[in-house]
Image: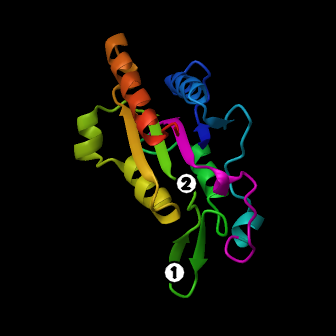
Amino acid sequence: MRLLMVIAHPLGDSLSHRFADRLSRDLTGRGHDVTLRDLYAEGFAPALTADERRAYYSTPFEDVTGLQTFDGMILVFPTWWFGLPAILKGWIDRTFLPGVAYSHDPEQGTLHPGLPCLKSVLAVTTMGAPAWYDRLVARRPVYRALKYGVFKPCAPKARFRFLALNAAEKVTPARLNRFETRLTRAATHLFPTEP
């Protein structure tokens, strides 16, 4: 499979980079073609310009990142304040564009999917909050934003999996090992090697 992996953490020794490295080695070792995008390392500019916003629905955008050519996508990032890091939110704003990730019907206000090739998405995050707080109090805002706000409208047939390492600041080696085992299992299931 042709996979896009997007990493959004400023520290190279972070858990996000550890997970991305592990996934990249595993997936390329199984024969997948993995394209890595480390947003902080490449100095990605997340903010839309005034001209980009003015042209948002009036000018057809080109798929400059090749978004429409990938079979799978992996997002690896920390959850900060129960949201995406600004750089990753900006990457989505500047990449999931009209004419690329979706088409927009201004009369009805509806979106039509533009990523039929995308078969699977894996979102991997770390967060300081315990799982019970994320689920019961905050009601999983990052999961819901990605699944229902980004991928359902743009790639409704893509399988979506969200793995969160909660209470990440207090992670023990044993719990980290269990999470990485889950990570490997999820990647193997979502991105199978064809016979």
- Residue 21: quadrant of the picture: top right
The residue labelled by disc 2 is 118
Q: Residue 19: horizontal and vertical position, in percent?
A: 51, 25
Residue at (37, 16) in percent of width and height: 177
Which of the numbered marks, if any, corresponds to residue 109?
1
Residue at (38, 53) in percent of width and height: 144
Q: Label 2 is placed on what type of residue?
A: Leu
Q: Label 1 is placed on what type of residue?
A: Gly
Of helix, strand and loop, which mostly describes the magenta segment?
loop
Q: Nearer the viewer, residue 143 or 81?
A: 143
Q: Is residue 50 left or right of residue 98?
A: right
Secondary structure of the residue carrying numbered label 1: loop
Q: Is residue 148 left or right of residue 131?
A: right
Q: Start and end of the magenta stretch?
A: 56-80
Secondary structure of the residue carrying numbered label 2: loop
Image: 20 above or below 121: above
